[in-house]
Every structure is written in structure tokens, then in C-alpha cells.
Image: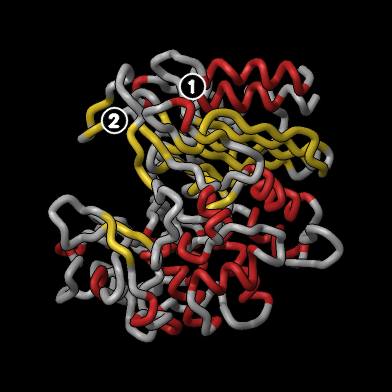
Amino acid sequence: MGPEKVSQSLLPLLGNSFCAVPSLQVAVVRSGEVVYAQSFGYRHIDPDPSQSLPVNHQTRFRVASISKLVVALGAMRLVEQGKLDLEADVSQYLGFPLRNPAFPQATIRVRHLLSHTSSLRDGSRYSIPSPYTLQDFFHPEGRFFEGGAHFDPAHPPGGYACYANLNTGVLGTLLECASGQRFDLFMENEVLRPLGLGGGFNPSRLSPEALGNLAVLYRKQTGGVWNPAGPWVAQVDDHRGVVPAGPVTPNPDRPDNGFITVDLNTYRPGTNSTFFSPQGGLRASALELARIAQLFLHQGRVGPTPFLKAATLQKMMEAQWIFEGSNGDSMNGQALSWGLGVWRFTNQPGQDCPVQGHPRPWFGHLGDAYGLLSGLLFDLEAAHALVYILGGQGCDPAQHRGLYSAYTRWEEQVLSALYGLLS
């Protein structure tokens, strides 16, 4: 299938069907090089269609949990610099004891955060604004302790995997402690800019032009009720061209959990990076995510300068956990193995199988938040990669599961089309 046919096969997703998506951005890397990139749909949908703004290759999206893989790269930079130890007790960096109350003698290590084996859980929320701190999650007197809901009472850290966004919120705070930099600045200075990425975790640091080219994420949903025949409803990043004064995060002190802008002038790095959304708040384009894939495919280089050692990237891809039936939560078959910040796809039919018939495992990460679905998948041996970002969903994804995998039918459609360019 050639590029033109790929584009034609993706266009129906942007049509007038009840299950249309508002925007789509994709990229394909073959033998280490980008061979296809395309953008479809609208980054802003206006009641007056003539005022809607199209997606282009520079449009950035809040790419959801692919952010976790990028934050893991930052952690491994500090590991190589000797500032972070994967086997260390996280308490050593946080400055307060972090223990699962059910297993007070069991150490929660840095690598546990990266492999979802920490025994931490999300509870009702995993992001809180400053001046709240991480201790508000984990200490009994904390505002968000929730009777210990952020801890697994049945499994100690180290062996049982359960996906938790809070792991990356804690990890982001560790990066502040180990580097001495605020999370968003650390990620810009040590990861994103060296890799040639221009986005970040803090929209208030974007230029007005870059902010205007952020994609609004949409659902056809109001109050939790899907209405496929209804209008697109903005979920996040609907800034209307106005640069916010700081990071924007849900406000737990409002009945509607509406958004609040955090005042960074009073924030003390190393106390709570969760409001930057380390778990999902990276703004990036498909072509920028393709550079992340190329980092792995080119053994630690993007361009002439080494970013990480090849051995470090290999360590990230090695299995830290493999599903054996009762040693973790597989997310209904979506996640059967974790590395260090890396989702390891084992190609089990009906489960973690992004593309039918592919002979080797994929590595990378998926994302799902505020209506967006995203994926960054790479095949190390063949030096191939597939990247997709869907900027919203028009109907309930639970009613449209994949035909051959545990993912959505829309993801299967996109991946199958992109895969045709690898042959």
C-alpha cells in the first residue's frame, strides 16, 4: 500500500459517521527513517465551520501516557549521570519515608515506579495542585490519603504489576529532587530540546504561536453520557489563544473538579510534580514522537550527538515484569509485559497485538486520556516505527473494541493502514 492509498484509507475516520474522530496525525519510520507523515482534521472545531482550524504537521497534542516513556528517558539520563539509582529506596530522594502500610518493611525502589510494580495505586485522583504535596497522598493525615487508597493492601512492591499513573507523578518529583530542577524545566533542558522536540509539559511556557497550534481534545460526551449524533465537546487544551499563567490541573477543592492554574512562584521543586501531569501531559506532534522512536532505533542517537548509551536503552526494553496469569493486572490483555518505562507488546492474538501477522514484538507506549488515543510502537530489529494520535472519539470506545486485539477498532484501522507502508 502506497502513501496515497494510506491517506485515502484513513480519511473515513474523519467522515460524518457516528464514530468519526475530530483529528488524526500519523508518522511511519521504515529502516530508521521517516517515510510518511500526514495530518487530518481540525485542531479546533468552531460552531461556524469556516472558523475551524486544521491540523498541520507542527500541531501538538497532549499525547497522554506516551509521556511516561519520555519521562523514563529523563530518569535514565540521571541514572547515567550517577544522580539516580534504580535500586535505591525512593524515600532517599523524597525526604520522607514512602512505604506501603500493609508492607512497612518492603522497599519501594525507583525501578518499581518505572515498571508499575511499586504497589502504589491511583485512588480517586493522582494529580493535585501545589501547595499540596505528595505526602497528602501517602500519609494518614494527608488531604488525599483516602483511607490508604493509594496503596495495594494485598501485594508488596516488586512482583505484582498494576498500571498506576501516580507512579510517574512520584517519579517526576524524584527527578526534581535528583536534578535540582523543576520538572517541566528538567524535561525541556535534559530531554526534549536535546532530542529536537519543541513542546513540553507546561503550556504556559509555549509561545503564543505554539499555543495556538495545540490541538483541543474532544469527545461527543457530556456528563459521562455519549451522544454520537451530538456536537464535539472540548475536553482539554481549549485555550482560545490565551497563554495560561501557569500549569493547569483539576482543582480538588471545587465541586465540579474544574481546572485551576498553579502559581509556580510559590512552588518548591521536589514536593509534588503531579500537577505538571508527568503521566500524560507532554505536548508533542507525531513527527516529534517519531524522533523518540528513532532514538531507540539508532542506539541512543538522534543526530550526531549521543543522548543515551545503547546499553541503557537496552535495559529499558528488558522485561521487568511478564504476565503469568495471577501476578498482576493485564488491563484486559492490553499489557502483558513492562520494561523500564517501556510497554512491551508480545503480540498475543486478541490481547496486546497492535498489528496482525507481525513476526516480532513491538516496544513503545500507548496513550488514552480526554478522548485522545495515541501510540508509539517500534520494531528494534527491523528499525521500523508506527506513530498515531487520534484527537478525540465520537462514541463509546467500550462498544467498539478491536477485532483482533484488546485495543479499539479505530486504533486497529490506523495501525493496519500504516503497517502497509512497512512492506
Image quarter of the N terminus? top right
Q: Position of residue 116 (x, y in %)?
A: 44, 56
Q: CA distance from mark 2 to mark 1?
A: 19 Å
Label 2 residue SS: strand
Observer able to see residue 320:
no
Figure label count: 2
Mark found first going from the N terminus, 2 or 1: 2
Q: Give left or right: position of 88 versus 83.
A: left
Q: Which mark is residue 227?
A: none
Residue 98: image x %, image y %?
33, 76
Residue tagged 1: 409
Residue to which mark 2 is pinned: 221
Q: Residue at x 47, y 48 (%)?
A: 64
Task: Give the image location of residue 48, x and y in percent.
Answer: 40, 27
Answer yes or no: is residue 43 visible.
Answer: yes
Left or right position of 289 against 118: right
Q: What's the residue type where badge 2 is placed? A: Gln
Give the residue displayed 54% in from the left and 73% down from the top.
185
The structure residue drawn at horizontal position 41% and vertical position 32%, both measured from the top left corner, is 46
